[in-house]
Image (cartoon, rainbow, N blue to C red):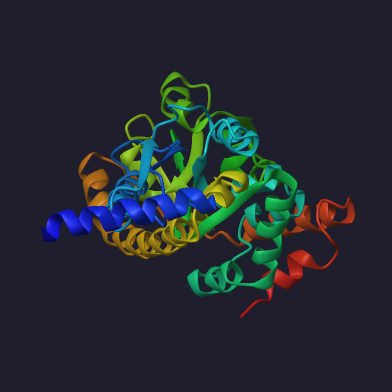
Amino acid sequence: MKCLTRTLAILSLACVFAFAGLTPAFAAKVTLKLGGIQPADDTSSIAMQRYSQLLAERSNGEIDLQWYPAQQLGDATTQIEATSMGSQDMFFDAGSFMGTFVPDKNVESMYFLFRDQAHYLSYLNSDVMKDFEDRFMKQQGVRVVANNYVRQPRSTVSTKPLRSLADFAGLKQRVPDIRGYLESVSAIGASPVQIAWGETYLALQQGVVAACESPLDMVYTSKFFEPAKHITLTEHIRDNMVIMINDSKFQSLTPEQQNLLITVGKEVGEWYTTQNALKVDEYVAEMKKAGVEFIEMDVAPLRAAVALRAQELEKKGLWPVGLYEKIGQMK
């Protein structure tokens, strides 16, 4: 009898909602397609698998996040554009790719802008970064959900030893479709060649390029050390990875779902940053066993050359006057 009474009560409540034109407070299941460009076994891809699992658990199955790594949905620029148009829901990779759409943000991709990790974190949490992300959303309709996936410093991987500025002269080096990278590589005398991340290994193997640059963990997971046995510890760029979502899609979600995407995204970002740092020593040891030479060099001449190029770009209006110095002086 009690079961019958409870069932009738539920049916009555449903009728009230239907009559009033209201929807009960249960959200329909939502499926989100998230793409990336890193290999499936990279720590960043494992982080997105974790993100998907936690979202499913904490939403009681409401959020089904489907993860597509390793350029299954195209290169970075293609996926960001697809996210902007709404044909793809979400994208995850380097925040610096936003510089293609918000030119001022290219300033962060100039080599040697950041002194150390503390300096970079100050920038990451600054009003300058918030302004870049806000403009990206207004211009492209793409919202940054979490930006605290902090990568390891980027160094240079090459098929020949690089020990001084002179060794970079004429060197064919792979760069992404990001203006700051292209300008920096050109400033140190190398010849930048734009190649998609997923094609970098083959380009090194076939001699299309003689160098690329990457965080050490991704040098290992992408196996760049196999065709290129020399790693110069330039640590020329510090950057992050971000989770992006089409803003119209984000606005279509319930407040609870929106909150989960953000809070779980940031939680996994902390996990990624910690795990990534722990993995690096292990990866370096493995690469040394494989015969990789690690080279330390005086990067002061490279830093000076890039700083000079940055001044020239600022005069040409690539970013507002004083922005490079403002970021460089952050505490």
Residue nearer the viewer, 269 or 29: 29
Residue nearer the viewer, 212 or 51: 51
Residue reaching furthest to the top: 206
Q: Hey, which quadrant is residue 305 in on the image? A: bottom right
Q: Hey, which quadrant is residue 176 in on the image? A: top right
| Rendered view: 2 above or below 45 | below
**Residue sitting at x 74%, y 64%:** 324
Residue nearer the viewer, 305 or 117: 117
Percent coordinates x, y for residue 104 in the rendering: 76, 54
| Rendered view: 298 above or below 80 | below
**Residue sitting at x 32%, y 36%:** 40
Residue reaching furthest to the left: 1
**Residue sitting at x 41%, y 28%:** 201
Residue nearer the viewer, 144 or 27: 27
Is 230 left or right of 75, judged from the image as shown? Answer: left
For residue 305, say whether it is visible: no
